[in-house]
Amino acid sequence: MNISGMPLADQTVNDVVLPGEGYYPSLSTAEFTRDYNVATEYANKPDMLKSKLTFARAEVEQQLQHNRLTVNQSLEAQQVMFYRHAVYSKAKAALLISKLDSTHRDKASQQQLAANENKEHWDWESLNAVRLLVALTPNLRVSLL
């Protein structure tokens, strides 16, 4: 049980690992649900989590496309931490918006406002983590003369 009295998802059963592509590290749905307090209704849907993480990863990697190290280098521990925080925060923002349900129309406007504020927070967290990661990554672009 968590502090709200809701049952916790079994993270070991539902863990899906999204392998890294060599340069960026792998991602784990168990780590995401544990560290980012994902609601049980989503934590028990590994396919949905995988989808949200895949889209979030693509967005973050697009933001980072000009800030890669050389091909043979990998990210350091602190860079991995910022990368994962950026991806997990972006996925958390996406989950918050998808949580709104049309069956509770009387509370829909309040829920929408709260969800938008929370989404903005997690989007900002993701962007901040990307900026921190970029600051740690020496920019090795070559300009053509």
Image (cartoon, rainbow, N blue to C red):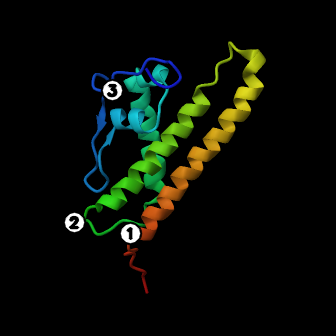
Which residue is label 2 attached to?
Answer: 72
Q: Residues within 10 Å of mark 3 (few under 14, many from 20)?
A: some
Q: Position of residue 84 (x, y in %)?
A: 39, 49
Q: Residues within 10 Å of mark 2 (few under 14, many from 20)?
A: few
Classed neighbour count for the residue bearing mark 1: other residues with Cα under 10 Å, few (<14), some (14–19), many (≥20):
some
Q: Is residue 145 above or below residue 17?
A: below
Q: Amino acid at mark 3?
A: Gln
For label 1, the residue is 137
**Which of the marked residues, 1 or 3, is nearer the chain's N terminus?**
3
Q: Quadrant of the C terminus?
A: bottom left
Q: Is residue 136 left or right of residue 74?
A: right
Please state which of residues 100 and 12 is positioned toward the viewer in this rendering.
12
Q: Is residue 41 above or below residue 113?
A: above
Q: Secondary structure at mark 2?
A: loop
The residue tagged with tag 3: helix, strand or loop?
Answer: loop
Whichever of callouts 1 and 2 sits on the residue coming sooner in the sequence is 2
Q: Amino acid at mark 2?
A: Asn
Residue 75 drawn at (x, y percent): 30, 61
132 sits left or right of 99 in the view:
left
